[in-house]
Image: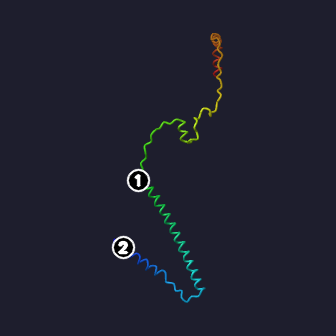
Amino acid sequence: MTMLESEKQIRKDERERTLADRVPALQMSGMSLQDLQNLCKELHQKIDVVDEERYDISAKVTKNNTEIQDLSQKIFELKGKMKRPNLRRVRVSADAMLGALLGAKVKESVDFKANLKTVKKEEEKKEEVTDWRKNVDAMSGMEGRKKLFDAGQ
């Protein structure tokens, strides 16, 4: 405790010495009103300059602090200390999933098939059923083979 108190006293004395060196004492005795006004204007200008410097320094400090936090977060991530949880497969019905996504807006079940487009299928051309014996007679001989050959081309 005594060491802390002595350090505080040393810092306080050093601060007073530096202020006494940098800021001379004002001697206002014997000054006219115009001289006092000029002195006040000069002091205000110096105060503005110091405020600008203080603002710039505080902006730099906040920027550096955010950079330090970002870099420490990146280091933390690179070390791999963050543990990923194991994912489990969950079976959810379509109604439950919509309820989870949309909230309480959808209470009735949604019929997905009602929203689908209907496509008309063309009916396949059915060959007429004919007597197979007539077909065999027509295909027999060289004429039938020629018909098959012509049909292939």
Say left or right for 134 vs 68: right
**What's the amino acid at mark 2?**
Glu
Instruction: Describe the colour scheme in one phrase.
Output: rainbow
* Residue 4 coordinates in the image, percent (x, y): 36, 71
Say left or right for 69 vs 126: left
Disc 2/disc 1 C-alpha distance (Å): 42 Å
N-terminal of the pair, mark 2 or mark 1, is: 2
Judging from the image, what secondary structure is the residue with disc 1 in? helix
Could you classify mark 1 by the number of other residues whose Cα lies within 10 Å: few (under 14), some (14-19), or many (20 or more)?
few
**Residue 153 seen in the current view:** no
Where residue 79 is drawn, which disc sits there? 1
Q: In the displayed structure, would residue 73 be above or below residue 138? A: below
Res 15 quadrant in image: bottom left
* Residue 71 coordinates in the image, percent (x, y): 45, 58
Residue in view at x 58 percent, y 39 percent: 106
Q: Quadrant of the C terminus?
A: top right
Q: In the displayed structure, would residue 80 be above or below residue 51? A: above
Q: Nearer the viewer, mark 2 or mark 1?
A: 2
Residue in view at x 45 percent, y 40 percent: 88
**What's the amino acid at mark 1?**
Lys
Where residue 5 is drawn, which disc sits there? 2
Judging from the image, what secondary structure is the residue with disc 2 in? helix
Q: Quadrant of the N terminus?
A: bottom left
